[in-house]
Amino acid sequence: MDFWPEFLASSWGREFVAGGFGGIAGIISGYPLDTLRIRQQQHSKTGSAFNILRKIVASEGPAALYRGMAAPLASVTFQNAMVFQIYAVLSKAFDSSASANEPPSYKGVALGGVGTGALQSLMLTPVELVKIRLQLQNKRQSAESQRGPLGVAKSIFRTEGFQGMYRGFTITMLRDAPSHGFYFWTYEYMREQLHPGCRKSGQETLRTMLVAGGLAGVASWVCCYPLDVVKTRLQAQTPSLLKYSGIVDCFRKSIKEDGYRVLWRGLGTAVARAFVVNGAIFSAYEIALRCLFNNGSIQSEDTV
């Protein structure tokens, strides 16, 4: 019974819990746009995001935009909490010259983000695999295929084994390591530009959190988007329908069939989602952190 009070009394506990709140806010705010992105990436003749949205709502209902959300939402609290906690540790570790009371250098921030992204891939790959399989379902498919996250996960494990659950792990790591470096570096740099001195004082406004977080999300997606398109196509495969033998083969066949533009298909949707989601993530994280460190109170500077 005494574990949680003691855990929250530590810096690690507060950062962990605040990261969980950030992850939940990000999933809820951006999941419909993520569903549109996945469908744009997987199919070559789906049209614009607006057309896809209209077709999904008309043929499958608005709830289809949230299909598969239970998989990431069930794990996102722990996953995002771990991401922020790992980043806090690694960013300091890569900048040993900084004191405990000073923020890490931008170099430490970038390297800490790269390490965080690489480690996160271990947790993220199975979750995204299940999510993508669910998002690509539609009502025309047989009742057998219409299953929830646990049903899809069990089916993958039964037919493809443990290795199948980590289909796309390499491409996920290649995507997440550099993108998280850009992600955290952009956030720390932009918040300082928008509100000078806030990295030390921790007193930026909510508007600064939203804008800096949104720009960080955009930067992380733009730098790795072609890899994300390949990842989606590889993870959408099933043993009965293996179109690509690997990362290079997927790149080659995708470009041959649809041209180089295929590597950027859905970028507009992803960027719009990234701004909304990551603005929400960093705002929820920072506000939760201030509540935990200030006994539930938020300083007046944190309001718009």
Image (spheres, helix red, strand yellow):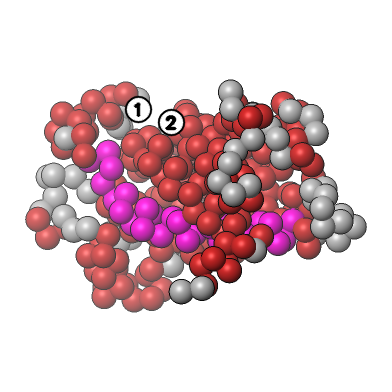
The alpha-carbon separation of the residues under discs 2 and 1 comes to 7 Å
> Could you say whether the residue bearing mark 2 is in a helix, strand or loop?
helix
Q: Mark 1 points at which residue?
A: 49
Instruction: Classify mark 1: residues with Cα within 10 Å, few (<14), some (14-19) or many (20+).
Output: some
Q: Which residue is situated farthest in the right direction here?
A: 97
Provide residue 177's location: percent of width, then percent of height.
63, 55
Instruction: Classify mark 2: residues with Cα within 10 Å, few (<14), some (14-19) or many (20+).
Output: some
Residue at position x 30%, y 54% in the image: 70
> Where is the C terminus found, in terms of image quarters?
top right
The answer to whether one can see residue 100 in this image is: yes
Residue at position x 86%, y 61% in the image: 96
Question: Are the residues at dot 2 and dot 1 in contact (C-beta closer than 8 Å)?
Answer: yes
The answer to whether one can see residue 257 in this image is: no
Question: Horizontal placement of 254 versus 95: left or right?
Answer: left
Instruction: Identify the amino acid type marked 1.
Output: Ala
Q: Name the residue under label 2.
A: 269
Q: What is the magenta segment's predominant secondary structure? A: helix
| Residue 43 quadrant | top left
Provide residue 72's location: percent of width, then percent of height.
38, 54
Question: Horizontal placement of 127 versus 192: left or right?
Answer: left
Q: Where 227 sits versus 57, above or below? A: below
Residue range corresponding to the magenta coloring:
64-91
Provide residue 130's location: percent of width, then percent of height.
33, 58
